[in-house]
Image (cartoon, rainbow, N blue to C red):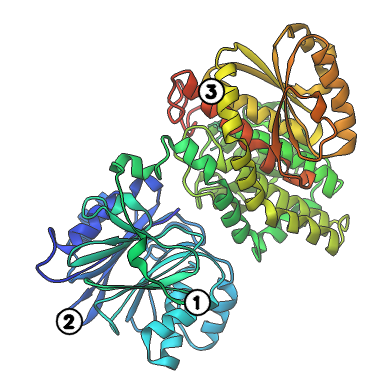
Amino acid sequence: MCGIIGVVALPGKTPYKPSEMGYRGLLRLEYRGYDSAGGASIDPFRRRIIVAKGKGKIAELERKLGLSKLPGYTLIYHTRWATHGRPSDENAHPHLDCRGEIAVVHNGIIQNYRILKEELLRKGHVFSSETDTEVIAHLIEEKYRVYRDFYRAFKEAVMEIEGSYALAVITLHEPDKIFFAKKDSPLIIGVGDGYNFVASDIPAILEYTRKAIIVHDNELGYITPSSIYLEELGRGSIDWSRRVRIIEWSIEDASKGGYPHYMLKEIHEQPRAIRDTLYGLMNEPVVVEAAKLLLDARRIYTTAAGTSYHAGLYYSLATAQLAKQPVYSFIASEYPSIADSVGEDDVLVAISQSGETIDVLMAVRAFRERGGRVIAVSNIVDSAIPRESDLAIYMRAGPEIGVAATKTFTAQTTVLAWLAIAHGEEAGVLDRSEAGELRDWLAKAPQLVAESIAANESLAIKLAEWIAGKHSMYYLSRWIGVPVAMEGALKLKEIAYIHAESYPAGESKHGPIALVENMFPVLFVIPGVDWVEKLLLGNIQEMRARGAYIIGVAAEDTGLADQLDLWFRVPCGHWILTPLTHTPPLQLLAYYTAIRRGYDPDKPRNLAKTVTVE
Ligand code: AGP
């Protein structure tokens, strides 16, 4: 996700030049991942806003544009993780209003930006970027024309935008203030002596102050070099003095949000990643375009690698159910095995969080060479695979630093569920109310995933102590639970280095059950679906009869509770949510087992985050 830092200072009161403080803070945000960066400041002598921004790395932009040498004492900086609009100089933040009197940086997604932009264009505003963020600058400008009171204009604009945001705004109208607002995206205030900060998170300010105020949702206000104003929308001003925290973390710890590893942080980030992904999908025309493409397809294929392949398996099962269409799912490196079946009217859904996996890219190229059309699902805007596809639908999980995929898997399955619903609706298999009900279930996912994580972390820690001593484990399920079981097995293999195998539970009696002996761990992913539970009962009993230790991931209303030796309880929900509610306990189990065995979950041996060589 994007990174923000703003600093406002009294002349002569700062340890460094304010622009150096902002620049050094910006460097501390690099770990969050970005494709472009920039800064803006108020030039006190010439009473204008100076903007320096572009696509590329911060060090390169420093050489070209002198980010650390901007004039003045009121500055905002930004690292951009593209969500709306490809990485480019024009789309980099900060963004200005028409008159160049307001500059905005933003982390999050403005869900209603299209409607707001159309209205502003009708009023004559001229835009210079494809971003949702630029709408905010023009909206404030429009409000200022009415109220002639900047904070009032800022507040009115904030109340009109929908979605997630952490905002920092500077203006010539009040040159010694930085205005801020927060909803769903992180924002803090750094309390200095003769200077104050707003920032996305703590690493950006630690070099200058350890005093921070965590801004809460629906709070907004402004900072000056010597004062802070904070209020809650609709409830008035807040006494912030009791909320000042002294940060004890090191900068390294702080970039992990206080978590010991990025992987654990990213497991816990899943509710927000899913929520931002859903914000990005609502009113996104490309989803309907993709659904129409799928509807007209002769055959539908999906391809990916690793975790993303598991998301693709889920997609094929969901599409078969919701659009009554078969989807052929193949591992990208196995493309040659299906090449001769591909023809002009075929459609491929290519899934890759990095958008750079070479196996997938080669499959996409080969598929298109045969006249097929490609829909990419990725987490990185304008990466190689989306660039070479006909359509691209993006998750908005933010950068995933841990090598093991966690939040990108649940974000991928959120996108794929949304696509399968749109396809079912286009195909006339789902009527509006059925599609609406399924989307309502997805809208509940952020909360349900948070509950799944909270309910199972301590149990995962406890079970990990035992699993850490095991050499092998089965992850079984049926139907929509199988891709989740496969994902759980991959996690245990890739970060705890324990052999884990996953297959559809009905296969046990065709061979694998020969491996089972006393206390052999067998984990069952149990989707909340009656016919699946009835079949899994038999599979559980055949394992138990051979002495297996039965671990279950199941909702509170499961009928199999008495069959389980250990039960990861997940929230009740719809089968479409299975990868979202049932995967977190498996991620936590793998993470804590790796820790128990003394391994670094962020940097598993032999693995790279993105496989760009064949
Ligand atoms: C998953 O934990 C692994 N990091 C790996 O299997 C990964 O999912 C695979 O390499 C695909 O990556 P992609 O989604 O970026 O294409």
Type of amino acid under label 3? Thr
Q: Secondary structure at mark 2?
A: loop
Type of amino acid under label 2? Arg
Name the residue: 44% across, 19% down. Answer: 598
Disc on the earlier residue, 2 or 1? 2
* Mark 1 to mark 3 CA distance (whole Å): 46 Å
Q: Which residue is mark 2?
A: 46
Where 272 falls versus 342 (above or below)? below
Whether residues under marks 2 and 1 lie with C-beta atoms below 8 angstroms apart, the answer is: no
Disc assigned to residue 593: 3
Please name which of the two marks, 2 or 1, marks the residue nearer to the observer.
Answer: 1
* Mark 2 to mark 3 CA distance (whole Å): 60 Å
Any part of residue 605 in sight: yes
Disc on the earlier residue, 1 or 3? 1
Q: Residue 71 at x, y = what percent?
A: 17, 69
Disc assigned to residue 235: 1
Type of amino acid under label 1? Arg
Any part of residue 374 in sight: no
Name the residue: 60% across, 12% down. Answer: 470
Name the residue: 63% across, 34% down. Answer: 585
Question: Camera-side residue: 197 or 172?
Answer: 197
Q: Secondary structure at mark 3?
A: helix
